[in-house]
Amino acid sequence: MKIVYSPDHAQHDPKTYFKSGAFHEPQEVPGRAEALVNGLRRAGHDIVGPDDFGPSPRAAIHTPGYLQFLETIYGRWHAAGMQSEEVLPNIHPGRHMSSMPTGIVGEVGHFTTDMSAPVGQHTWAAAVASSNVAVTATAYVLDDLASNSAAYALCRPPGHHAFKDQAGGFCFLNNIAIAAEYARRTVNRVAILDVDVHHGNGTQGIFYERADVFTVSLHCDPSDFYPFFSGYDHERGCGHGDGFNLNLPVPKGSRDATYLARLDQALEALRAYAPDVLFVALGLDAFEGDPFAGLSVSTIGFGEIAAKIANLGMPTVLIQEGGYNQNELGANITSFISGFEGKG
């Protein structure tokens, strides 16, 4: 399996993380990707770097105003005399506020969903590199569709919480949406299976009105878990996309057997849709030892999840999302890749 990775991820090194009413030590840090790539190297996998696909893949998903915001906000924030090291919002538009402000504080609130995606001096460069990793892995699979090939994109920062015009949940550019849209230049239909512990709210939002991208998400029940406001089973898509979004919430604390049974439902739906290419948003934060403590999937369980996905027999692009237990990330990604390759 082709494995794509860029060390440029380390340029995004957040110092701020706010949740549940308090500041915490950041979880989405460079050590995550380093733990993943080191685990894969120890297992004997070869790693390749990404190509630069230019601005068009990300511009096919994200709005021009949002892309300009991400690229320029750090410099403009400090030029405006703001004192914080990183760009952070202190207000967001509520349900009854929809106008776009001209001031920089309001602008930051407009383009972010929460306080977990601080923009540092080099966040834009890292996010661009991450999206290029995803598109490079996709290009490898598209070049060998006939053999149902697979590739793994070790993306950081992650992407599935980023909307077309908002950052949030550690995410800036939606890597899997960018990759799926890139594939649509070549194939007719793609599917996205999200196995991160958190619902991929940004990915769902981007494709919610489309029938050419089937989005399926297994995640911890969001009634009391991030992102709280989406990921429910009644969310089925709308307009042309009605019926092309499937959420399968999993009860908090569920272990392997419960998760795998829910996964079978997702795989049945994917077989019925029969995409030309399958994209997997690969979160390893469903792990039983992950600090977010949503689900309790074991290291062996990740291999079983992967084997079930591989048995679909579809060209597949694996795109890294969450996973925050750095001590176990190497073992968990190795288990998943081995399970997918039939070596588990």
Image (spheres, helix red, strand yellow):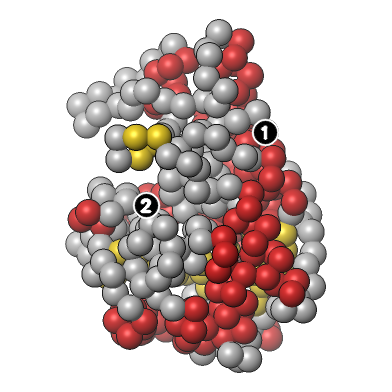
Left or right, 279 with reference to 90: right
Q: Nearer the viewer, residue 214 or 286?
A: 286
**Left or right: 298, with 22 as reference point:** right
Where 301 falls versus 344 (above or below)?
above
Q: Secondary structure at mark 2?
A: helix
- Depth check, front residue: 55 or 39: 39
Which residue is nearer to you in this view: 186 or 174?
174
The type of residue carrying mark 1 is His
* Quadrant of the rendered image containing residue 271: bottom left
Residue occupying the point 22% across, 54% down: 224
SS at circle 1: loop
Report the disc number at residue 201. Answer: 2
Residue 274: percent from left, percent from top: 46, 80
51 in relation to 143, above or below: above
N-terminal label among 1 and 2: 1
What residue lies at 56% left-to-right and 17% top-to-bottom? 77
Whether residue 272 is visible here, answered yes or no, is: no
The residue carrying mark 1 is: 122
34, above or below 193, in the image? above
Quadrant placement of the N terminus: bottom right
Q: Position of residue 207 (x, y in %)?
A: 41, 54
The residue nearer to you, when weighing 198 against 33, is 33
Q: Residue at x 52, y 25 (%)?
A: 87
Report x, y in % for residue 48: 79, 64
Where is residue 108, by image quadrant? top left
Kindly identify the residue that appears in the image at 71 percent across and 66 percent down: 38
Marks 1 and 2, how far apart at CA: 25 Å
Assess disc 1: are there few (<14), some (14-19) or many (≥20) residues with their C-alpha within 10 Å of its C-alpha. some
